[in-house]
Amino acid sequence: MKTYRGAIVGFGAVVEKGHVPAFAHKSARFEIVAVADQSPARLEAAKTHYPSAKFYGNLKKLLKAERGLDFAVVGTPPLYHAKLSAQCLKAGLNVLCEKPLVFKFREAKKLAELAKRQDRCLFTVHNWKNAPPIAKALELVKSGAIGEVHHVELHVLRSKAAATAGGDNWRENPALSGGGIMMDHGWHNFYLARAFAGQEPLSIKAALRRPAENCAEDCASCLIDFGGATALVYLTWRSPIRKNLIIVYGSKGNIAVQDSDVILETPSGSQTFATGDKLSGGSAHPVWMAGLLDDFAAELDTPALRGENMKEALACAALAEQGYKSAGTCAAKRIALTA
């Protein structure tokens, strides 16, 4: 098996706590040989993990100096994802980009088309699908254990936004993050809702709470129509407790994911699957990231497998964009995923 040589662009908290241990666990498949970050302090932090790597103040210098790279990890604040991912793709690199990939559906479509022209993989970090409780719940749904899915609910309770490296928290700055909790946690829950429903989204109606005008929303309630199913996504940074809850209602039973436990209920009784991995256990999730790196490697190894992750990203970008547009209006906007 080939070992892929890569660079990290943006060495933030999630990269340091999530990506670094995941890459260490998958060292037979991935080698980090270069890091770019405009912050000298973050480059110093990167040197403690990758002492033999090369370090650069920006991506342009890295691409000019490095040869033989296979991929780049884009881990900057979201505002820069589209530009940096495009630069890497144009340089002939595969790209693993943190979520959200972009803020707008049109931007996602342009990047997807660029990746296709360059014959390169563009892969967004959708690592929540690799969480053991969610993987088990999806397995049960796909097995037909609860029949046809009618409705999905995903609840994310947090007391505040996840911390970022350095000074101010960019997650609470809409100019850098693209919004608030709906762009941050919402992106993960949008692709999970799509996976549980097993259908493409048709429309979304969102209600948002902003503590002050022009600031990031700290609560979001989103109702998504999938045609044959619906989904409710509730997200908050105002909860006194930290918790995740998922409920999937089907024609033959229900599935509940309560942090680490997956509970299957049917007319014949209930069964609990204890995974031992709490969804609310942290923000970096290195074990989930290691599983995602296997998925990324599969697309690098076999280009014919590419496509599903990009479809997820396109759906998430459409839902986020139309969710913000719908907030405060009466009519849901129709989503055209093929536009």
Image (cartoon, rainbow, N blue to C red):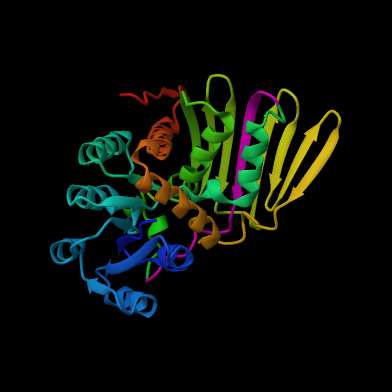
Q: Is residue 101 at all visible to an observer of this figure? A: no
Residue 241 percent across, percent down from the top left: 66, 57
Question: Which residue is more in the foreground, 208 or 96?
Answer: 96
Is residue 160 highlighted in magenta?
A: yes
Q: Nearer the viewer, residue 50 or 302?
A: 302
Q: With respect to residue 229, does 321 lie above or below? A: below
> Does residue 89 appear to the left or right of 293 in the view shown?
left
Query: Residue at (42%, 40%) from the top-left corner?
Result: 309
Q: How many marks?
A: 0
Residue drawn where x is 54% and y is 31% of the image:
223
**Residue 192 in the image: above or below residue 58:** above
The residue positioned 58% from the left and 51% from the top of the image is 131
In percent of width and height, residue 9 lies at 29, 62
* Image quarter in which the N terminus is found: bottom left
Quadrant housing the C terminus: top left
Q: Nearer the viewer, residue 292 or 154?
A: 292
Residue farthest top in this picture: 227
Considering every residue shown, the one lying at the far left of the view is 64
- Residue 42 is drawn in which quadrant? bottom left
Side (left or right) of 282 relative to 51: right
Residue 325 figure quarter: top left
Identify the residue at image location x=44%, y=54%. 293
In the displayed structure image, the side of residue 263 where residue 111 appears, left or right: left
- The residue range painted magenta reads 147-166
Front residue (pair 272, 79): 272
Q: Locate residue 179, reporting x and y percent.
A: 39, 47
- Say whether residue 233 is magenta: no
Residue 29 in the image: x percent, y percent?
Answer: 40, 60
